[in-house]
Image (tube, rainbow, N blue to C red):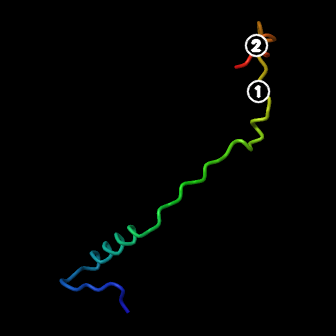
């Protein structure tokens, strides 16, 4: 049983293959985008940042950045 039937004209094998590929590409489901990673659970966010060094380091350590 053939699913594709050429009604009029003589189609070459390459033309039939091109038609089947074009129809298959059109009906293929779109690829899903990868899920967005949520960083709020990342334990690296709880790690301490670097400590300031040099002149005035003790003052800048208590000031917001």
- Of 46 and 15, which appears nearest the observer? 46
- Measuring 34% from the left and 69% from the top, which residue is drawn there? 22
Q: CA distance from mark 2 to mark 1?
A: 13 Å
- Measuring 20% from the left and 83% from the top, which residue is drawn there? 10
Which residue has dot 2 on it?
60
- Of 26 and 12, which appears nearest the observer? 26
Whole-percent x, y for residue 58 in the image:
81, 11
The picture quadrant where one finds residue 1 is bottom left
- Measuring 33% from the left and 75% from the top, which residue is drawn there? 17
Which residue has dot 1 on it?
49
Helix, strand or loop under label 1: loop
The picture quadrant where one finds residue 15 is bottom left
Whole-percent x, y for residue 36 in the image:
61, 49
The picture quadrant where one finds residue 4 is bottom left
The furthest residue to the bottom: 1
Determine whether 59 is above or below 14 in the image.
above
């Amino acid at each position: 049983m053939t699913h594709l039937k050429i009604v009029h004209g003589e189609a070459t094998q390459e033309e039939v293959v091109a038609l089947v590929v074009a129809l298959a590409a059109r009906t293929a489901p779109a690829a899903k985008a990868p899920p967005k990673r949520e960083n709020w659970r990342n334990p690296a966010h709880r790690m301490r940042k670097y400590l300031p060094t040099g002149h005035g380091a003790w003052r800048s350590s208590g000031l917001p950045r």
